[in-house]
Amino acid sequence: KQEVTQIPAALSVPEGENLVLNCSFTDSAIYNLQWFRQDPGKGLTSLLLIQSSQREQTSGRLNASLDKSSGRSTLYIAASQPGDSATYLCAEGMDSSYKLIFGSGTRLLVRP
Amino acid sequence: DAGVIQSPRHEVTEMGQEVTLRCKPISGHNSLFWYRQTMMRGLELLIYFNNNVPIDDSGMPEDRFSAKMPNASFSTLKIQPSEPRDSAVYFCASSLVNTEAFFGQGTRLTVV
């Protein structure tokens, strides 16, 4: 059974710090991996999508990497800001149907 | 495009009543997904449509749950009869095959 694990479950950092969120998956035949942001009471906002043939994707202060051999993905946030406070979810795309298996998320708090 | 639109945003109903959740995907997207989010189980895929055809409904918890997609611009998720354990946030998402998924704001369902 495919599983996606995110560690830590919660993280609190001071503003300006660079940070890394971790995601691990058990299915080495991963099709793609997507990182989302969820604000309280809101839907999910797509941040980055990494195809299985790619090693990383970048968008502004965000950089996501994918290592299929180790079953890991990381989301790097540079120069964190209070507005980055949210829950970050990673999701494994299992096949071309694009069904997603979600991790339980990392709740991030960036303190001013 | 206004994004994925779900209605209602909140629904409170009594146990045993029928509940219908609605979703309008992004125009041009050919894949539609219904997910359920709870504190205990996180985000779970309920059913997936491709070109209006249900492809995988293995995540639908019971026969009380049914979903339809009569055309490319509309889908419903129905629970009949509803039970308190169905209380959750239900998300609809749409995508083109092998591209990022876009989520609606969700419907928060409370069954009392």
Image (cartoon, rainbow, N blue to C red):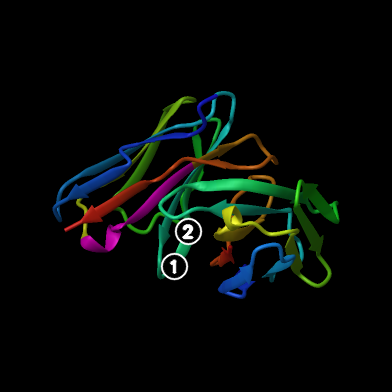
Who is closer to the viewer here, B9 or B41? B9
Amino acid type of the residue that numbered disc 1 sits on in the rendered structure:
Arg
Q: Residues within 10 Å of mark 1 (few under 14, many from 20)?
A: few
Q: Is residue A56 found inside the magenta-colored segment of the image?
A: no
Discs 1 and 2 lie in a common subunit: yes
| Residue indicated by mark 1 | B41
Q: Which residues are magenta?
A: B84-92
Question: Which residue occupies 29% across, 58% down?
Answer: B86
Residue A3 drawn above or below residue A92: below
Question: Which residue occupies 72% across, 67% down?
Answer: A19
Chain ID of residue with mark 2: B
Question: Which residue occupies 17% across, 49% down?
Answer: B13
Question: Which residue occupies 70% across, 41% down?
Answer: B98
Who is closer to the viewer here, B78 or A13? A13
> In the orientation shown, which residue stands out farthest toward the front?
A112
Chain ID of residue with mark 1: B
Q: Residues within 10 Å of mark 2 (few under 14, many from 20)?
A: some
Element under label 1? Answer: loop
Label 1 close to label 2 by CB (< 8 Å):
yes
Amino acid type of the residue that numbered disc 2 sits on in the rendered structure:
Glu
| Residue indicated by mark 2 | B44
